[in-house]
Amino acid sequence: MRRAADLVARLQALQPNDRNLGQHFLVEEVHLEAIVELAGDLSGRTVLEIGPGPGTLTEHLLRAGAVVHAIEIDPVAVEHLQANFTPELSNGSLTLDEGDALTVAWPERIDAVVSNIPYQISSPLIGALEQHRQRHGAPDVVVVLVQEEFAERLTIATPADRGSLGVCTALGWSSSMERRVPPGSFRPPPAVMSRVCVLRPIEHPSEVDHRLIRQTVHAAFHHRRRKLRTSLRRPPRRLSRLPGWHAARWKAALASMDDDPVLDLRPEDLTVSEWRDFCRRLAAAEVQDPS
């Protein structure tokens, strides 16, 4: 058994922590075990791990019988993993790609994602996860360790946490906040509390393209203190990528909804279901073809 503290010490002996990569390595075995347990039975399952670093979580995933596909951007950490996980790399239970998880191709089939996500790329990685789902299907479960403040926004812990991140995530995922992990459980310790989040895919029958909802939500929260009547006046930047949508249709649809009371609310006033209903009305608005 490779102990977490030993793995971290070996990597730190090769180089100091890279602040630019947000490296905070989890060393307490009890938290590592709990993260893996939240993912359920991983025996023989393909698990994507983003940012394995010293391999502390990797060790626990392998011990649970997972087939791990890890993506690591730090070349020194890659060298460390190759030296310390040689048997698993040889027998195929561990695959290691060097590169940025936001640009490196993920395996098409992923049964689970289990990661201590680098804090500064938490939000883009959630977006990348949704893009992978649209192309190849969703993993059964996602278990990620993130900053507690990010976890609150991701899961919309309170109405005050409503934002584009949580609303757009809730369109296709159920989410929950689980175990709290204090700074002292990491080397080096971060300045904030961390939290484990669990996401599971859900399917909501919808009359509305989720891409339209996401674009509308992002446009509204870009000016979150403004009422929707003002913040949605300008069409979303990527609207033309949606079949049948263009700036003229957007403006005409909103004009036809001028009496809709939702337009006098701010984006954080709407629940996820209310966003769905509003975008359904937007898509169904009868407008004349400007051509």
Image (cartoon, rainbow, N blue to C red):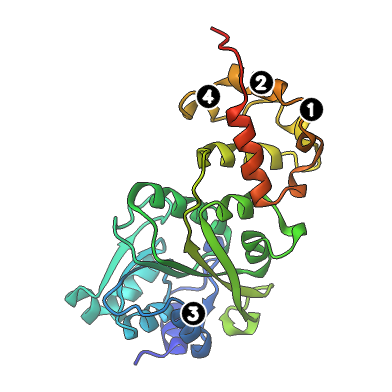
- Residue found at x 52% / y 64%: 118
The residue that disc 1 covers is 259
Residue type for callout 3: Ile
* Distance between mark 2 and mark 1 Cα atoms: 14 Å
* Camera-side mark, 2 or 3: 2
When asked about the image quadrant of residue 177, the answer is bottom right
Image spot of residue 245 (x, y percent): 52, 24
For label 3, the SS is helix
Please tell me which of labels 2 and 1 falls first in the chain.
Answer: 2
The residue that disc 2 covers is 251
- Residue found at x 75% / y 49%: 268
Please tell me which of labels 4 and 1 falls first in the chain.
Answer: 4
Please tell me which of labels 2 and 3 falls first in the chain.
Answer: 3
Residue type for callout 1: Asp
Position of 80 with respect to 164 (left or right) is left
* Distance between mark 3 and mark 1 Cα atoms: 49 Å
Residue type for callout 4: Trp
Residue type for callout 2: Lys
The residue that disc 4 covers is 245
Please tell me which of labels 3 and 4 falls first in the chain.
Answer: 3
Q: Which mark is residue 35?
A: 3
